[in-house]
Each structure stands twice: as structure tokens, then as C-alpha cells.
Amino acid sequence: MRTTPIVVILTGSAPAGRVRVQGWVRTRRDAKDFSFIEINDGSCVANLQIIASASLASYAETVSALTTGSSVSVEGDVRPSEGKGQKYELLATDVMAHGIAPVDYPLQKKRHTFEYLREIAHLRPRTNSIGAVMRLRSGLSFAIHSFFKEQGFFYIHTPIVTTSDCEGAGEMFRVTTLDINNPPRTEAGVVDFNKDFFGKEAGLTVSGQLEGEICALALGKIYTFGPTFRAENSNTPRHLAEFWMIEPEAAFYRLPEDMDLAEAFVRYLATYALDNHGDDLAFFNERIDQGVISRLEGISTSPFERVSYTDAADILMRNNDRFAFKVSWGSDLQSEHERYLTETFFKKPVIVYNYPKEIKAFYMRNNDDGKTVAAMDVLVPGIGELIGGSEREERYDMLLNRIRDIGLDEKNYWWYLDLRRYGGTPHAGFGLGFERLLLLATGMQNIRDVIPFPRYPGNAAF
RNA sequence: UGGUCAGUAGCUCAGUCGGCAGAGCAGGUGGCUGUUAACCACCUUGUCGGGGGUUCAAGUCCCUCCUGACCAGCCA
């Protein structure tokens, strides 16, 4: 007999008839002549209630031995529930245990802290919260591809191992096959990376942007969606050492089109979550964050605020008395400033654009005012920076001067400069941190709980 | 990495002024029975994060180390 997912049974317009379900026991309650068994198979947040009669052949040996966490196959007939709280239930004709969980099963029938669940990452996907996160994560991953396909973007695979550092994006993890206890050295005594596997220093990518630009200047519109690594000693609820980033890049786009794309993208994903993950969102709204659905509805329906850095700085300077760090034109926006703009002043997602060039990366396009670059950040309530993007400097001389001005070695960027020499075009793109999007979509507080196996300083178990 | 707070039973936590180690849940036994984190009664469970110090006496005060969370920085 084929197995029926619990989500299919519970969302059916009529009882599903004779079925087999397979999953894990959440709880068992014994009545006089039968037991209630609630099982969850991961297909949805809801459990299926099983009625296991004491007259079953397997009752004494199997049913009465079932504990929270045990795995079972159950066959029976779906029928309308006699009790309150569920539409259907399964009257079992056979209950078979695959594995009985001993009494030291770490997940109890009660609320656990997320800190505790991180210590048992091999079992936490069986919880309602993490299960819902992972289903939504899967759904939004699919939606990302749908959006870009609909918009005519091609999915590009940029390298994980790289020898180019996207300057300013962060510290890289080193990739090497050298013997770290006895590396080859040059006559000067420094480690000789010419003898390393790739013939030079290599690391894990901190961004696919530079390679993305290569492909955009051939295919027009592209995006990447892959793992990204930052070896920063960051200890916050918003940072991971390994995270997934979406980076679209489009030839002939300028900053306004880039902002339009970012806004349409976030709105599409919010709408997708509301339309396709209502049950999981209802769970988050009830148990995690009572504002999450209304926030997604706001994103889905109302335009983002757009404000230039200069105007944003004016707003902040008028309220300087409320900040620990006072704002003046040219200062970088601190977390408290970003959150004031999006959470207090505008109370919705805000796109800040045209930042002072001194506080932004070398590849961003200089504006004609000589002071600012065509950069933009999308700030959202509760998180701060969700997206960072820019129009790229496509003018060869301007880019070369910028590289020299800030002391980078132009030889390391020869191919990046070549793109400007051979048929360069205006182009723009941005990076969106997938886990930060999931924080927004779930209302979860810590980024370590929206990825199955989080990596952060001191932690890469599992 | 800096700042703040925390670490007590398997889990979630209380523990007052330094004076016998506690509750709920989980687990066990019995009862009840269409339950919903089932319910009722009784019972079991401790390296009070590690080390050192002060004291007649330390979960409690001091020093130190470890671990975690939050805030800040780095950014997505």
C-alpha cells in the first residue's frame, strides 16, 4: 500500500478512505478501550490523530509501548473525528513500530528553548518550529527560481572556491591542501602558496558578484543562489559564517531598475509565502511572532519607501538626541539608525540610496555629484539590512582610479577591468541574505534557527 | 572582538539577609476514560558550569576559566 502524506489527508474535502501513514509519534493518550496516538510526518505542522483499539493484535506489544519520538507505520480508515480539535482521524487496523524511542528522547511534549534545540540539531527538525521553518525555506527557495524565471533571468553557478576577494565583503576562509604543520616556504620564509593546490592563495567565496558580472555581460540578466562564507567573528542573531545568498545582476540596469527589481522580488516572496504556506505562517503567527502575517501582508501590498542617503541623514539628524551615535552627513548608518528609519519613522521597508562613496565598496558607480555612489540598501523592520546593492562602475578610467585610490592592487582585478574594456555596459545588481529573508517571513528571532545546520564561531557540529 | 546578563534535576525555572536543595513538566506505580501539552493520587531524580579563595557555614560573597544569550562592530 502506498503511503499518504498527512497533509493530503487533513486537507482533503472528504475522508481519504483506506490509507497508510508513516511518521513519528508526538504523543499517546490512553483511554479505556483504545489509545489516541498523534503522529507527525513532516508534511505539515498538524498531527494526525490515530485511534488504536485495544482489540488490535499489536496493541499490547506495540501500541502501549509507543513513546514520544517513536517511528510508526499505521494502516486504517480515515473518518470524520468524533472529538473536537480535528476534522479527520484514522481508525487503525494495523500499527507497526519501526523504532521505539527510549525514555531519554530529548524532545519532550512541551516547549523547549531554541538554545537547547541547537544542541540537538540532529533532532530539532522534528519540532513544530524548525519543521515549519524548513518547509518555508524549501518553498521560498522554489519561489526564488520562479520569480527570476518569470523575469527572464538565468540561474548561474558561481564558484565556491575562489582566489579573488570581493573587496570589503569580509574575511575569507582559507582553502588549502598544504600541510599546516609544515608548509613549504619561500626563501624569504613566508608560506609558498605557489606550491598549493591552486597555485595561489584560495578561499571560500564571500560573494559571487564579480563572477556574476561576467555572466550578466554575456547573458543579460542572471542570478546566483548559493552558499556564501564569511570568516568574521560575528556573534549576533543576524550573522552566520555560512549562509545562502541570492545575487541578481543585470546588464543595462541602472539604480532605479535595480531598486524596482529588489522591491518586486521581496514582494513576490512575501506574497508566495502568504499564498502557499498559510498553515506554517499561522503557526508562526500564533507561537513565534504575532505580527508576522500582517507584516508580510504589508510588504505584499504597499510600496516600499525610497529615500536618498542625504534625506535619510536629515531625518536622523533631526532626531539625534535619541541615538547613541550622532549622525552627520557622511557618517555610516548604524543599526540603531537603520532600525529607526524602518521601524519607527516609516514603519515599512525602506530603500536608502546614493550613499557617500567613502563608506561603500570600490566597484560602486560614482554619481555626478562627485560625493556619492549609486548604492542602495533595503532595510526592513526587525532585521535592518536585508539587501545591499548598487549600480556598478562601468567606466574603465573611473574604476581604475578608484582601485588605485583605495590602495588595491590592480593586477588582481585585470579581468574585472577587462569587462570594462571590451564592450562594457551599465549594469547593476544586489545581494539578498536568504536567512535574513526567512527571519522576516517567520518572525524567528535568531538566524541560527532558520538554517538546518548553522555555522558560527565555535560551532560546526552536525 | 568589546560590553551586559545568565549557567541549579532529563527539560523549563524558583531559591529572600550566607544557615537542611525546591516546583512544574518528563519518568515509575495506581486510578479515571473521546482525549487534545488529557486528568487525579503517590513515588524516583542533583558534580548548584569547572577550578581556586573568604567564612564556623557558600547555590548565594570574591578571583579565574568555560559555555550560552543579548547589545555593538563586521555585513547579507
Image: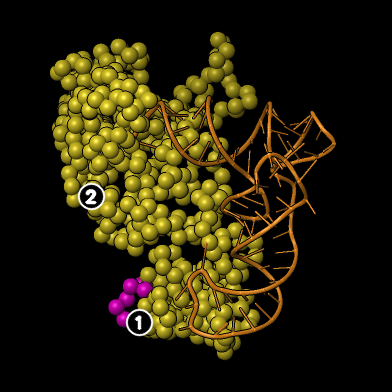
Chain colours: A yellow, B orange
Mark 1 and mark 2 lie on one chain; the one further toward the N terminus is 1
Using the image, determine if residue A373 lies above or below residue A456: above
Q: Which residue is mark 2?
A: A298
**Given the image, on which type of amino acid does mark 1 rest?**
Pro
Using the image, determine if residue A111 lies above or below residue A437: below
Image coords of residue A298 (percent x, y): 23, 49
Image coords of residue A386 (percent x, y): 31, 38
User: Measuring 16% from the left and 31% from the top, which residue is drawn there?
Assistant: A254
Q: Which residue is mark 1?
A: A15
Q: Residue furthest bottom?
A: A55
**Given the image, on which type of amino acid does mark 2 rest?**
Gly
Q: Residues within 10 Å of mark 2 (few under 14, many from 20)?
A: some
In the foreground, A89 or A402: A89
Q: What span is in magenta?
A: A8-14
Answer left or right for A31 relative to A294: right
Helix, strand or loop at disc 2? Answer: helix
In the foreground, A67 or A400: A67
Asked where in the image residue A379 lies, by quadrant, the reply is: top left
Q: Chain of mark 1?
A: A
Using the image, determine if residue A20 lies above or below residue A155: below
Q: Chain of mark 2?
A: A
In the foreground, A111 or A278: A111
On whether residue A172 falls in the magenta region, the answer is no
Q: Would you say residue A82 is visible in this rendering?
A: yes
Image coords of residue A176 (percent x, y): 52, 30
User: Measuring 30% from the left and 55% from the top, which residue is drawn there?
Assistant: A293
Q: Residues within 10 Å of mark 1 (few under 14, many from 20)?
A: some
Contact (Cβ within 8 Å) of mark 1 with mark 2: no
Q: Would you say residue A137 is visible in this rendering?
A: no
Q: CA distance from mark 1 to mark 2?
A: 37 Å
